[in-house]
């Protein structure tokens, strides 16, 4: 159980894993002039002997090679790996692996050597053929071109008498099993490098990078892998420079490549190609011309550059990806025990090809933080070093073990006892070793898995280094992180923030993006033809938000919420209504109560002076009913104020329709009464009967009954109900009453309009009838005001929402009611209260007689 918990924490905690990634720094001496003379390709002939090889054998051999100025460090690693194999008694008993005739030359010299050499000069080096040689093994690398040249040369002479292994970077050309059937590669096709680069770019928050690659099959293949991985995480190329292999072609276009990098907005450029290609020349030229970019390369590009190339800007330097290998221990001890006086720390440090690993602690690296001019080799000699292998050195180390495992599987004694001639024996054993080579797989002493099966996929890990080029021929390479495919997606890059901060003086590299991030409240807008990483930021539409960076779409807030000013989150809307606490609601309520009180006061005046002429002349009972209905008209407006519910929503419309029907019916009855009173003559006994019998009193109940029927139909079909208005007022939800059936609402309103129009028409016809107390003119004006108010109400009502719509309806109710009250009863109250002389029947008769 404890083991399971431990591995769970290990896989799910990047911070915990950082404790298992040691901070390492590497010092190297560099020399520009000597670098030009460094070898580019090596050839080693390996074979077995049936006698014990002591350490003195390699000591004498290396001394000889050093004296002849052949100082390639590959010789040292090969000797070390063979010595390690030979001293293991359980590995190859009674057999020793040795090498002779090493060539480490420039590719051009390799061509010359192959051109002038005879087959016997190369295929049979100077060793004793009678000492049990079973099959010569040729180890070539790290330059793939030299390996192809030698394979082409050998395939035309004795291809089956030499087992050919190559080390160094993988090249797709060597994967052709038809053309290169006798070449075996230690390196596998590296598809995970593109994944590592993309994961690291995401870690640095970079999505806009440049790429410079060699214009060959290897570069094209890498471009396809990288493009596929970048598309998954929306990382784009600012430019892709395909550097031609031909130097003359490159020189003719050099200015174009230079300008493309200089004018690009990216801060990160990836380099991929061979270190001896035209791309390498272009890279040194760009660095010399002062192009300040963060260069991301592979471990093969970790080579000394110009003395003038001092990377003192912390934000512009080299980042190198190196395949992670287990630690090979004992190399320094092996070298120094060969000749302790000769191969000292000082001697090893002066070899410009050596890297030295500061194993003590990261603080040893940090002590050099302020060293711009005063550090020297003497300081370097005071440190504790252990030699760090390069990638090609590891390949040579593994190649030796591959050969050892193959030989271990060959029944040597049985082969030696077979009565066949040497040539057939070579062919038979080499063929046997060829067939075994394909199946070879093992775990090396460093703990790394090694397989010769090219179809088997290996999960690779990479160390990430930051490289400083310093004065006085020194270079500092700091390990800042690690990439591993064994960890979950998004957590595959683990970086030591302390080492990154020390190397770059910041925990963040310079950003490299095509467009700045769209903050919350904005969304990305891509124009046609633009790269996926290039966009403009636009504000979210009204009531829509984006709560993250670089959002492609804004999200609309729910109906009960609204977007804040920054439009990055939704805020619940406040539920409001036209309440009595609202100043507008309070003002309308006071107006309704005031007009109701005024109407009650007028009713009181009429009741107090009910025996006067003017009250009697205008049908007292209809006046009382009209005044009471107007009082209820004013009071019904209070139903529209306050938080509505189902009951108040129904009462609003029903009460409004019925009380206004009663009021207008009273006006209609008054109007008809006036007309009949002035048109009654002796022959017209029927009109007299209608006027005297009280038949006009049925007008009000009849008209009201019709309105009640319409309201009942309204309630049965679709009654008014509580509704919310979430859009009229920003940030608020207004509770209003929905009319329900709009048709029923307009039928009720239209019926009132018909009654008002009928009253207006009749009153208008009777306006000029001669009489002292003829109120036809007042009735005409009251209906004119009523019709004008409600005709104006319709367009205003439909153009408003929320509380304003409710306010318009309340105002129309009070305006129409006040119009009737003022036009009909104010003149009468004036006569009753201020001109009582006009309200006396005796005075009127005296005036008439005079």
Image: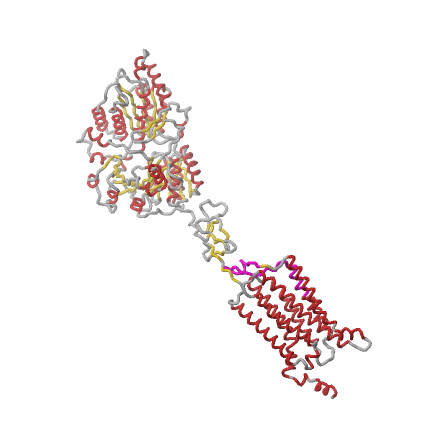
Q: Tell me if I can see residue 281 in this picture.
A: no
> Is 635 located above or below residue 439 in the figure?
below
Furthest toward the right, the residue is 683
User: Is 64 on the left-hand or right-hand side of 763?
Assistant: left
Residue 805 spot, x, y in % from top left: 58, 63
Q: Tell me if I can see residue 386 in this picture.
A: yes
Dividing the picture into quadrants, the one containing residue 609 is bottom right
Dividing the picture into quadrants, the one containing residue 794 is bottom right
User: Is 51 on the left-hand or right-hand side of 322?
Assistant: left
Furthest toward the top, the residue is 419
Q: Quadrant of the C terminus?
A: bottom right
Where does the magenta region start and end?
722-751
Q: Nearer the viewer, residue 302 or 841?
A: 841
Q: Quadrant of the N terminus?
A: top left
Counting every numbered tag in the picture gives 0
Dividing the picture into quadrants, the one containing residue 410 is top left
> Is 719 located above or below residue 219 in the figure?
below
Residue 293 spot, x, y in % from top left: 35, 44
Residue 623 spot, x, y in % from top left: 67, 75
């Amino acid at each position: 159980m404890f083991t399971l918990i431990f591995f769970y924490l290990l896989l799910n905690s990047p911070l915990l894993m950082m404790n298992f990634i040691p901070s390492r720094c590497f010092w190297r001496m560099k020399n520009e002039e000597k670098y030009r003379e460094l070898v580019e390709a090596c050839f080693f002939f390996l074979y077995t002997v049936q006698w014990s090889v002591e350490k003195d054998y390699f000591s004498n051999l290396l001394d000889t090679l050093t004296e002849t100025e052949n100082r390639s460090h590959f010789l040292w690693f090969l000797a070390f790996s063979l010595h390690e194999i030979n001293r293991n008694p359980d590995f190859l008993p009674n057999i020793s692996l040795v090498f002779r005739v090493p060539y480490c030359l420039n590719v051009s010299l390799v061509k010359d050597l192959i051109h002038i050499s005879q087959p016997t000069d190369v295929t049979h080096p100077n060793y004793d053929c009678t000492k049990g040689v079973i099959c010569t093994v040729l180890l070539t690398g790290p330059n793939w071109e030299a390996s192809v040249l030698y394979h082409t040369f050998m395939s035309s002479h004795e291809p089956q008498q030499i087992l050919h292994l190559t080390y160094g970077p993988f090249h797709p050309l060597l994967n052709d099993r038809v053309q290169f059937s006798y070449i075996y590669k230690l390196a596998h096709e590296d598809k995970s490098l593109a994944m590592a680069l993309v994961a690291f770019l995401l870690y640095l928050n970079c999505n806009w990078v440049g790429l410079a690659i060699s214009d060959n099959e290897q570069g094209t293949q890498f471009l396809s892998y990288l493009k596929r991985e970048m598309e998954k995480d929306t990382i784009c190329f600012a430019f892709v420079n395909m550097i031609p292999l031909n130097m003359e072609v490159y020189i003719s276009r050099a200015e174009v490549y230079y300008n493309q990098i200089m004018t690009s907005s990216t801060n990160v450029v990836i380099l991929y190609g061979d270190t001896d290609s035209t791309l390498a020349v272009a890279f040194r030229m760009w660095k010399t011309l002062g192009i300040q970019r963060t260069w991301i390369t592979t471990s093969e590009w970790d080579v000394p550059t110009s003395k003038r190339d001092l990377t003192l800007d912390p934000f512009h330097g080299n980042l190198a990806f190196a395949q992670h290998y287990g630690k090979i221990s004992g190399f320094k001890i092996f070298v120094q025990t060969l000749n302790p006086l000769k191969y000292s720390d000082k001697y090893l440090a002066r070899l410009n090809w050596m890297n030295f690993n500061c194993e003590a602690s990261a603080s040893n690296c940090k002590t050099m933080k302020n060293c711009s001019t005063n550090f020297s080799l003497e300081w370097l000699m005071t440190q504790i070093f252990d030699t760090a292998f390069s990638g090609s050195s590891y390949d040579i180390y593994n190649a030796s073990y591959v050969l050892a495992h193959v030989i271990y599987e060959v029944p040597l004694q049985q082969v030696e006892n077979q009565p066949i001639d040497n040539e057939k024996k070579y062919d038979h054993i080499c063929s046997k070793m060829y067939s075994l080579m394909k199946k070879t797989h093992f775990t090396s002493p460093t703990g790394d898995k090694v397989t010769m099966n090219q179809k088997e996929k290996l999960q690779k890990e990479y160390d990430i280094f930051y490289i400083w080029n310093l004065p006085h021929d020194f270079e500092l390479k700091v390990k800042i992180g690690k990439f591993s495919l064994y960890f979950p997606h998004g957590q595959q890059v683990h970086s030591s923030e302390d080492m990154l901060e020390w190397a770059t003086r910041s925990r963040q590299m310079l950003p490299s993006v095509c467009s700045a991030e769209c903050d919350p409240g904005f969304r990305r807008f891509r124009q046609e033809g633009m790269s996926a990483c290039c966009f403009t930021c636009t504000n979210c539409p009204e009531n829509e938000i984006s709560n993250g960076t670089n959002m492609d779409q804004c999200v609309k807030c729910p109906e009960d919420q609204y977007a804040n000013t920054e439009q990055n989150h939704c805020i619940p809307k406040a539920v409001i209504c036209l309440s009595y606490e609202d100043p507008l609601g309070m003002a309308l309520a006071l107006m309704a109560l005031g007009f109701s009180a005024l109407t009650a006061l007028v009713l009181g005046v009429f009741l107090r002076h009910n025996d006067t002429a003017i009250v009697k002349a205008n049908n007292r009972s209809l006046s009382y009913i009209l005044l009471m209905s107007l009082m209820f008209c004013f009071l019904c407006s209070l139903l529209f104020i306050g938080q509505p519910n189902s009951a108040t929503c129904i009462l609003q419309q029903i009460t409004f329709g019925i009380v206004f029907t009663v009021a207008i019916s009273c006006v209609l009855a008054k109007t008809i009464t006036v007309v009949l009173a002035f048109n009654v003559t002796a022959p017209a006994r029927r009109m007299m009967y209608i006027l005297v019998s009280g038949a006009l009193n049925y007008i009000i109940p009849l008209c009201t009954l019709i309105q009640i029927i319409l309201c009942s139909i309204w309630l049965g079909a679709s009654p008014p109900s509580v509704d919310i208005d979430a859009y009229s007022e920003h940030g608020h939800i207004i509770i209003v009453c929905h009319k329900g059936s709009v048709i029923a609402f307009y039928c009720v309103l239209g019926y009132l309009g018909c009654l008002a129009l009928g009253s207006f028409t009749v009153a208008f016809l009777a306006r000029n009838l001669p009489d002292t107390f003829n109120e036809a003119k007042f009735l005409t004006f009251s209906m004119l005001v009523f019709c004008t108010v409600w005709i104006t109400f319709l367009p205003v009502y439909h153009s408003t929402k929320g509380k304003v719509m409710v306010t318009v309806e309340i105002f129309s109710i009070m305006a129409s009611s006040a119009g009737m009250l003022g036009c009909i009863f104010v003149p009468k109250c004036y006569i009753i209260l201020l001109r009582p002389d006009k309200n006396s029947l005796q005075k009127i008769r005296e005036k008439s007689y005079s």
